[in-house]
Image (cartoon, grey):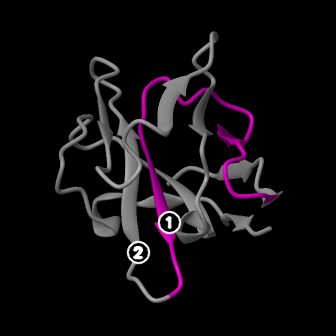
Amino acid sequence: QVQLVESGGGLVQPGGSLRLSCAGSGFSLEDYTIAWFRQVPGKGREAVSCISAADDSTYINDDVKGRFAISRDNAKRSVILQMNSLKPEDAGDYYCAAETRFLICAPNIIPLDFPSWGQGTQVTVSS
């Protein structure tokens, strides 16, 4: 278990951008596979994106492909989710999560694959 902290959520107009950050509490996330999940009203919790600890390979949900991007910062201490061209349906609570068992990102990742979670950050998309 590790302590994770998300930041960067807020209110943005449709078409706008937000940059979410996931950081460990006083430690680097370099050795962790990190995923972003979101809880959207009317839908179940879904995986948005993931970056692998093994080789930094990534997964991106088709619903946000071309608009969102995941990356590690230059020092590999935190993980960034850059969200562009935001749509109202993107609104919800975004959580980062970490695991060390498999250290890969698969298209079928589920919340139970990730033992450690942050508290979430709220994203609101409204005009």
Residues under numbered marks 1 and 2 in contact, where contact means CB atoms less than 8 Å apart: yes
- The part of the chain drawn in magenta is 12-41
- 77 in magenta: no
CA gap, disc 1 to disc 2?
6 Å
Which residue occupies the foreground of this view, 26 or 55? 55
Which residue occupies the foreground of this view, 49 or 52? 49
Above or below, 80 relative to 46:
above
Q: Residues within 10 Å of mark 2 (few under 14, many from 20)?
A: some
The type of residue carrying mark 1 is Arg
Q: Residues within 10 Å of mark 1 (few under 14, many from 20)?
A: many
Left or right of 120? Residue 8 is right
Residue at 27 percent across and 22 percent down: it is 54
Q: Which residue is mark 1?
A: 38
**Mark 2 secondary-structure assignment:** loop
Q: Which residue is mark 2?
A: 45
Left or right of 115? Residue 3 is right
Residue at 25 percent across and 44 percent down: it is 101
Query: Image quadrant of residue 72?
Result: top right
Q: Position of residue 119 (x, y in %)?
A: 67, 66
Which residue occupies the foreground of this view, 64 or 36? 64
- 15 in magenta: yes
Q: Position of residue 51 (x, y in %)?
A: 38, 33
Among numbered discs 1 and 2, the one appearing first in the sequence: 1
Q: Position of residue 70 (x, y in %)?
A: 48, 32
